[in-house]
Image (tube, coloured by chain):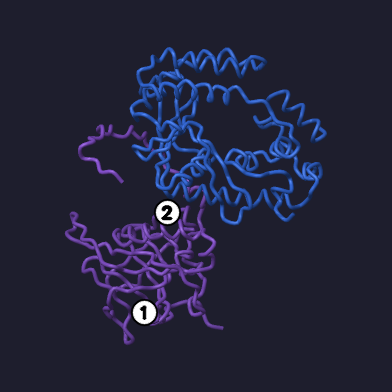
Amino acid sequence: MALNIGASGIIRPYVKYNAKSDKWFIRAEGGGDLEIARPTFLLDLANIRTGWLRFQEGQAPERLIDPALDKVAPTPGEGFKRGFVVMAFSPKFFGGAVEMASASIHVSNAIRDVYAVFEEQSGRTENRGKVPVIACTGADAMKDKYGTNYRPKLELTKWVDRPAEFPDASAVEESEVWKGNAAAASKPAPVAHVPPPAAKPAPQPVYETDF
Amino acid sequence: MSNPFERHGIGHLSASSLNLWAAEPALWIMERLLGRRSPSGIPAVRGKAVEAGVNIGLHDPALPVEVCIAEAESAFDRETTLNPDPRRDEERKKLPGYVRGALAELRQYGLPDADGYQGKVEIRLDDIAVPVIGFVDWRFSAHGLIVDLKTTERLPSAIGASHGRQGAVYATAHGNFGMRFAYAKPAPAKGDGRQVQVLEMSGDDVRAHLAALRLIAFSLGRFLALSHDARELAGLIVPDFDSFYWSDPSVRAAGRDVFGF
């Protein structure tokens, strides 16, 4: 029996988006990153997981996965950021099934928005049991205090049957999932009063267009 | 017939029905399966009456508040004429305060949609055979907002689960509208002077509560599938008569009749 200690030496194939350079990379055969064109791929959003991720130079990524999408694990410590882990599939761009994980705010926002579209469409009868096809059609430059970063434009273009090579399974190991007191962690923080919306100016008919 | 809901004459669900099933299933069985409906409690009547007064004040911003208060009092009196609840008079005295406070806050939102008050919404939950319906208080299309008014003695710091489920139904039925709950007290707080607290649900809140509603509906469906006989189903559940759900003497008496103790 093998001992469950030490490093396995196995690095899972991955795809990643570098928000600083607006470039996509996969793991090269011999190790290291290999740049690829803007991909079109299957994204297993039904099995996406969120959590706390920490990527540090020269170290294996660390992550603490939320027990559920609506239950946030407590932050494990300094340097961890909110992110996601999901499996993606494309024989053409990725060479098969790969893991996509990011704690970039811009990538996370792009995934959050495409997930909302996924949720809205996934309940339709014709999409049951199918997987969404996501196309990266470009990127938006996002300027903030850290300079210019890029947010990929991800579009859900269609739904297809799940290929046999793309299992319906979580991208994370059970050992990565936070096992603490979920009830306490999911207790909503006190929220503040929401002020009324700003008054809208009366419409000016001269500028209105008939539709 | 394989649909367990329709087998028991249930053509639709609602957030309040599912909340009751989750909180006190024995009362749900007594009311919804055996048809022994409980009279509306005074707090519920108070809420509806305040809504009625606030509603006419929102649709006519120039309408004096006194007229809105009179509307609320009239609605309250209509519903409580034969209600022996000792809290009746005390609650009636608070109606002017609730209406004033809520109107002061919500008139800032502008005019609600003309057809929005108590407008029926309907959504489907995945794999649940019957729809979930609800009735929204006000829809402000100019701002993309749904607002539901709650009367309360204490302002909450967060939207509770039962209200969250209700809001999740409304929000889901309205695409990308924001969902807000306006909690109104009868008088400004002594400390900070606040009388109304408006809280908004996040998209994550809506998704989480919708997922909970679906699971609760599953639980109910599985329970109903156990038997065609409502009496037999009632025999599987034990009521918690210490719960406030049973505090009304007439409800307690009906419970004794149904559950035998």
Front position in the image: B105 or A187: B105
> Which residue is label 2 attached to?
A74
Query: Which chain is home to disc 2?
Result: A
Front position in the image: A201 or A21: A201
The chain letter corresponding to purple is A
> Which residue is label 1 attached to?
A94
Residue type at tag 2: Pro
Task: Assign a secondary structure to mark 1.
Answer: loop
* Residue at the extreme bottom of the image, as rendered: A30
When the figure is inspected, residue B153 is found, relative to residue A109, above or below; the finding is: above
- What residue is drawn where x is 52% and y is 71%? A168
Front position in the image: B233 or A75: B233
- Colour representing chain B: blue
Other residues around mark 2 within 10 Å, as few (<14) / some (14–19) / many (≥20): some
Q: Position of residue A193 (x, y in %)?
A: 37, 33
Residue type at tag 1: Phe
